[in-house]
Amino acid sequence: MSFFTTGMSKKTLLSGIQPSGQLHIGNYFGAIKQFIDMQDSHNAIYMIVDYHALNTIQDKKVMSENILNLAIDYLALGLDPKKSIIFKQSDVSEHTELCWIFDTITTMPFLMRAHAYKDAEANNKEISVGKFNYPMLMAADILLYDTDIVPVGQDQRQHVEYSRDTAQKFNNVFKKDVFKLPEPKILDAVAIVPGTDGRKMSKSYGNTIPLFATDEEIEKAVMGIVTDSSGDVPQNVYAIHRLLKSEAELKDLYENSKGKYKVLKEALIIDMKAFVKPLREKREQLAKDIDYVLDILKEGGKRAKIKAEKKMEQVKSAIGVDLY
Ligand code: ADP
Ligand code: TRP
């Protein structure tokens, strides 16, 4: 590879997932697949955002297990520590430090416009200060690394906009271009993967197909997909099938089996099993070598920390606290 095609000219891409439970195929097609596809062409940084998850996971054992599981998942799916920085948020304390600085230039009404906050309010849920402030921690995650692109699902678009606004606000208030403005990267076709009930697939709705599901779990989940009785094509089945196969590949099957929901579900089960099997096997391999996985996280944390420290020097200089 020539000197000019390495490192320097690549854009920086960053994303993160909360260690808050089992990954599902919505996470994969909506977000992680892009993480993997973009590793070669970008300086990629992928986080396990454990401090975000602390808003909901407040149990030591569950937290540790979830972090480790997500690290194994990342590697099993193809994130490569030789190409990308893979780390956990809590290893780089600059994230929470910068979050605080952002808090001081951010107003309550600005944060009250966040969908997540409004939803919680609408449902009369008591929301923690951490959850209310979530967009600021996410802004710190993104802005610390001069990120150009943030690949996420549609539901995270607003959070990336919060990061842009916060970068701009900081640069204006302190009259220095410290932060780059990041762009979200959302693939329209898979922006919202539907769950087995037709709503957005989400662990909070219990409508998921787990990404590393056993054959039995796949059968159960697919057979449980809600089918409307009106059309020839069961839309919820088709929408998930389309993730695995092209329209052309599915055309004959769906035309020949109009209205035969069971036949179509069985076909989806076969394709889903074939898709999941190699991933599950890779995962089982990795799970046998926990030390290897932990070393990758540790190393990633060190590499990220060096970058974050450099950025914080610029931040501290811009706000005027760097006296020596
Ligand atoms: P969940 O809704 O299951 O809690 P998360 O909020 O942890 O999922 O999402 C992790 C990543 O996966 C985010 O980038 C999110 O946008 C993406 N994602 C989650 N569910 C879906 C879905 N149904 N379709 C597309 N992308 C999704
Ligand atoms: N908010 C994201 C989610 O719930 C997770 C996240 C935290 C993230 N920090 C990030 C995503 C930075 C992209 C970039 O899915």
Image (tube, rainbow, N blue to C red):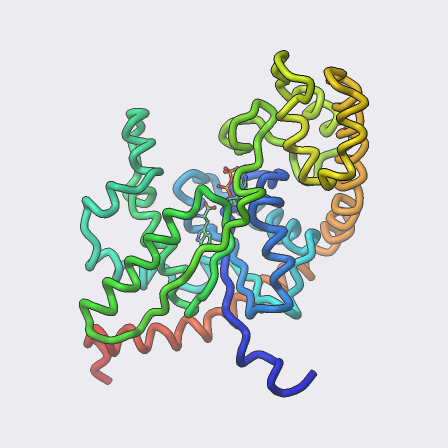
Looking at the image, which residue is at 26% across and 41% down? 113
The quadrant in which the C terminus is found is bottom left
The quadrant in which the N terminus is found is bottom right
Q: Quadrant of residue 313?
A: bottom left
Query: In the visual, does 235 lie left or right of 165?
Result: right
Looking at the image, which residue is at 78% across and 38% down? 249
Query: In the visual, does 111 lie left or right of 279?
Result: left
Q: Residue 129: x, y in percent?
A: 28, 43
Question: Depth check: 8 or 254 in front?
Answer: 254
Looking at the image, which residue is at 32% across and 53% down? 162
Q: Residue 48: x, y in percent?
A: 52, 53
Query: In the visual, does 150 lie left or right of 118?
Result: right
Looking at the image, which residue is at 55% across and 32% down? 201
Question: Depth check: 300 or 144 in front?
Answer: 144
Give the residue furthest to the top.
229
Question: Depth check: 209 or 228 in front?
Answer: 228
In this view, 252 is above or below 74 = above
Q: Quadrant of residue 310?
A: bottom left
Q: Residue 50: x, y in percent?
A: 47, 50
The number of discs equals 0
Q: Residue 82: x, y in percent?
A: 66, 70
